[in-house]
Structures are given as C-alpha cells and as structure tokens.
Image: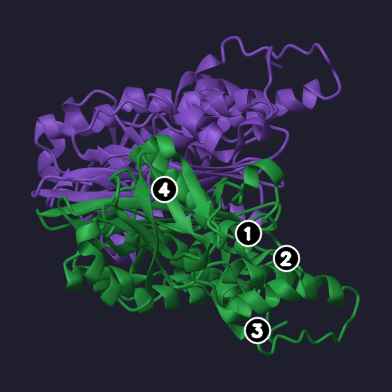
Chain colours: A purple, B green
Amino acid sequence: MEDKQTEISQLGEFGLIDRLTKELPRVNESTVYAVGDDAAVLSFPADSEVLVTTDMLLENVHFDLTYVPLMHLGYKAAVVNFSDIYAMNGTPKQITVSLGISRRFTVEHIEALYAGIRRACEIYGVDIIGGDTCSSHQGLVISITCIGEAPKGTAVKRSGAKDTDLICVSGDLGAAYMGLQLLEREKIASAGQKDFQPDFSGKEYIIERQLKPEARKDIIEALAREGVRPTAMMDVSDGLSSELIHICKQSDTGCRVYEDRIPIDYQTAVMAEELNMNLVTAALNGGEDYELLFTVPLTDHDKVEKIEGVKIIGYITKPELGCALVTRDGGEIPLKAQGWNPLADQNQD
Amino acid sequence: MEDKQTEISQLGEFGLIDRLTKELPRVNESTVYAVGDDAAVLSFPADSEVLVTTDMLLENVHFDLTYVPLMHLGYKAAVVNFSDIYAMNGTPKQITVSLGISRRFTVEHIEALYAGIRRACEIYGVDIIGGDTCSSHQGLVISITCIGEAPKGTAVKRSGAKDTDLICVSGDLGAAYMGLQLLEREKIASAGQKDFQPDFSGKEYIIERQLKPEARKDIIEALAREGVRPTAMMDVSDGLSSELIHICKQSDTGCRVYEDRIPIDYQTAVMAEELNMNLVTAALNGGEDYELLFTVPLTDHDKVEKIEGVKIIGYITKPELGCALVTRDGGEIPLKAQGWNPLADQNQD
C-alpha cells in the first residue's frame, strides 16, 4: 500500500515501542510519569475520583480492515474509551494501549494506527501512559484502558433513574449502523474487482459515523454549564433499546420512549429505504453511535431543552410498567435488547 | 474434559459477565464502585499516587493450553500484573480483565480461568473492577490492567541507580525457563500418545515456577520494614541480562554482576544438565521469574543482607564501563539483551 514498508522484526519489541512513543506529549498535570517503566505514575487532586474503563477490539470481530483505514481504527479505538468516561460524567485523562500484531503488519501500518490514537488523544486532551506490544498469530488485537477523573461524588451511574425523570439522548441514532451496512454492501460489490470505486456521495455522514465516531465531550460540558446533573447516564454503544433496558434494570424502573421523538438523520433514513430496512429498528438496535443517553428530573426540563443537540425522547416509569416504545399511532411495543452481541453470533451486527 | 459443558452462546455476553462477576468481593477502600457501569469509580487518599500497568497474553504466543491449565493461566495473568506494581514499590489494588474467547471455549472453561484470576486477587488483596468480554475468531486473548497505589513520592523507577550502588535480586533465577523447557519436552514426548503420563517427580519446583509464579509482595514489605528504599527497581520478566541493561540504560550507568553470585535453584541446575544447556545462560536470559531486581546505596548493605531471600549480585558502575558479567575465573563478558522478544521471533523462548 504505502511506499516504504519496514518489517517489525527489524526493530524488535523495544525498538517498535521506542518509535511509537517517541516525543509523546503530556498535557495533564495528573500524569506524573508515563511510558518506560513497569508502571505509569499518576497523581490526582484529593477531591477527585478516578474512573477506569477498558475495551478490547479484535480484527474481523469488531473491525474489518478491508474497508477500515488503520488511522481511523486507532482514532475510534481511543474515542470509544473516552466515550465511556464521559458517560460517567467524567473527563478522560490517560490511556494505556496494548497491541497484538501479526506478521502481515509492518512498522508503517502500526505507525498509522498509532497516529490515529495520538490524534484522538490530542483532540480530547488525553495522555498515552503505557501499554504492551506483542506478536499475534492471527490478526490485530487492540486493548485500550482509559483513566478518567471526576470531582468526588459527581460521577453518574446507570442506576439512578427515578419515576417521572425525562429520558434524553444526544445527536442522532442509527447512522453508524447504516454506515456499516453501506460499507459491507460495497465490500461485497467490490469483491474481485481491482479498480472498484465505491460511490459514497451523499452518504458521507453515515460513513463518518461508522469509521470516525466522536465522544460527546461537548454535551458533558453543556450539562455542567446548565447546572444539570443527570440521574443516570450511559453511552449508546449497543443500541438505544439495549441501553434503555440497562438503565431501567439497574435503576429498577420502566420507561416509555416515543417513536416520533427518536432523532434520526436524513442520510440514515435514505440508506434504510435503499436497503429496504426498517428505520426505527435500525435506530433502536443499531450500535456504535456513541451518543449519550441520560435521565434528568422533570424540573430540569427547561435547562435540557436549551442544550443544542439534546432531545427529550420519553420518560421513566414505575418498574411494573416495563420498557416500551410508544408508536406513532399510540400503540406500545415492548423494547427488546436486540443489540450487538458479539459473543452470541460472532458477528458485528 | 469436565463433566458438564455449557456453550457460551447460551448465556450471551451479558449472561457470561453476570456469571463471572457474581458476588465479587471488594476488599479495598479505594474501590468505590466496580463492575456494571461504563467505568469503575475509585477514590485514593490525597497523599497517594496511582500506578497503572497492563499486560496482554495471547494463546500460542504467551501460553500453550496443551500443558497450561486454565486456572493456572488466570492466576499467572493476574500475578504478572501485580508484579509490575510491586516493581514500582507500590501495592496492587484493582484490575480490569478483558477476554477474547473463541468458540471452542465453554462457560466452564472461562469460569476456570476466572477462578484463577479471582484466587490471585484474593491472595494479593486486589479487587476486580471491570473489563470487557468478546468473541475471538482464533484462540484466547487476555488483557489485564492493574491499578496500584503508593504514598506520594515513594514509587521507584528504573532510572535512579547510581555509581557504586549494590545490585540485589530476590529468590532464584532461570527456574521458570527450565520449567518451560521441561513442559515443552514432555509435550513433544506425549504427542500422539493418549495415555502418556509425564514424569515431573523431583522437578515440581521448576514446573510451579513456570505455571504458577508469585509476585514478591513479601520483599516489598521487608524493604519497607528495614527502611530501605531502592534507587531503581524492576521485575525480572524478560531475563536478568535484559533487565540489567534496562536499568543501566535508563539510569545512565554501567554494572558488574558476578557469575558465582547469581542465585540458582538445585532443580534448575539439574534440568539444565539433563538438557545439556548452559546454566548461567539460562539464569541470565530465561524470562518469567518475576523476581525483583533492585539497586540500593552501599550504605544499605547491612540492611539488605538481613532480608531473607535477597542476594547482592554485583554493583553499579560509571556508564563508560558498560554492563558485564564477571565470570568465576575473573574474566568479563559483556551482557546482552537476549531475553524474550516475542515480536522478533514469534516464539516464547
């Protein structure tokens, strides 16, 4: 692909690590000592809590390198971890990056992957503080752990939703899933054709949502500005239905969500029609949107209404009412966790 | 192997996680909120620093399930991370556990692996606070991140060794490597034989060193008791030679280590003779001992001599003298980092 390719065995493990971690910036005061020892050393203010989240990504389970550029993959691998920290109402501060690399990857490939991770860290103000690099017999393995920070007692769990709370979601849903469908369709269409050029015009948004998602740092900042502390929050990685059921189960509540309130982008709708898929199903069950789903007390109605990019989609009920979608005609359909379950089907959708 | 085997797809990702993390104990005050949300919440005392280390283990690169029992593997995967925290003069407090699991593993297999992890956590006083579980197309992937704690300013890096410092090492070296050689030999001998019974009598120690290593919590405690703070420290995972070169490079020093001072167990010596291998080479370059290698000022000589299981093996020199082994006949051989480099040779030894 690229011009010059260097075998990883030429550098060895330590040589590769040196090259990847050369001149890593350090932007957070809490990062005392980073890469290069048995462990990194961090120091947080006394009134802070430390948040820890981790994600593992495996080639051909979570990503397909036939259409995912390595730089985008690195960016996304970092951002999905940041998203988990924002979903706790915290700020991501550090990550460790562990890579399992098979022989078909060159130094330049891994540099591209790492460049994506570094770019994400630069944009979100996060330090790379360590990791592990080893050989893999099959494919690429990425395991990132993110450390975040939140003032003591301000972290928001999934379990605090209360009857009559409003359910809010940021951005729009289903776009990343429809982007994946499009990429998969073009992959099949291109099979065996050397000079195949996929046509993504008019579909840039859903492609970007799949390949280069962002974490909603802006929403966390807006909530703080408005003085709103959600009662429960999580990010939408497995699909709205699945996440709503998590919040309701852990909060011991039920919920009602209105079909006509679910935010869906125009490109998502067009793509669903083209592929003859049910749009609401895609928005409810498509994963990887990395939007924030949260609940606030009724009294915060006016404050959340003011926040750009946040939509109120329903409300929390008593547990005995269960979790349901209120359809356009006023009917109720029980929500099901049909989200992404890579253990059940070994497949991404 | 076992009696009843349950397919993981019967439980799904969330079902499996629920089963593995059921009734997880919480022993550390710093663990505020563990498994079950977007991130775990930790809270450390104001005068503490937070240590972070991570290790990735891949099947057939780092372990061979033909002779490594899953419970031992889980135990070892946790302990090698604890060892990195002790090597910073800290105390391990929390881990996250990410697993990539292929279809040939059942729920019972993963429970055995997790039981080993839980046992290690129980013995070392560490809480499991989260992780990620996903399917893998090929083999087992284990990625563990460990969070530790040390009073502010007490963490020991690799870079603090000074000219004339004493070089000390705990326990004995080369045993885990010889254990691996024995296991590999018996694996080859048993190939194709259904009822083959390997004979490990008289070699239990080296087998245990390979399959179920321990982290030297006791040495860190003894050093604290004696009031000794090492100037530099790391754990011996890649072999003594390689680690000494790390310390000297990062401290900008040289070193002299005496061949006749390197601690070697009797079983290690017997096995090396049986396999016609050079014993000192095995002790210098064999990895996975997880002993502590550290340097102390000359003035601490009497204090470290008192600590059981610690041996003074040499001293730190000016950088221009380089790193060398002083042989029994008084000759000098430059040390080389021939340690385990899984990126260069895709092999464990």
For the point 24% across and 45% down, the residue is A42
Check disc 3 and report the residue beneath it: B203
User: Farthest front residue?
Assistant: B329
Callout 2: SS: loop
Q: Nearer the viewer, residue B283 or B222?
A: B283
- Marks 1 and 4, the one that precedes in the sequence: 4
Q: Which residue appears at 29% of the width and 25% of the height?
A: A309
Q: CA distance from mark 3 to mark 1?
A: 20 Å
Sequence-first tag of 3 and 1: 3
Q: Are marks 1 and 4 on the same chain?
A: yes
Chain of the residue under label 3: B
Callout in the foreground (1, 4): 4
Does residue B293 sit above or below B21 in this rendering? above
Q: Amino acid at mark 4?
A: Cys
As helix, strand or loop, the secondary structure at mark 3 comes to loop
Q: Residues within 10 Å of mark 4 (few under 14, many from 20)?
A: many
Chain letter of disc 1 in the image: B
At label 1, the amino acid type is Thr
Task: Compute the Cα span from label 1 to label 2.
Answer: 8 Å
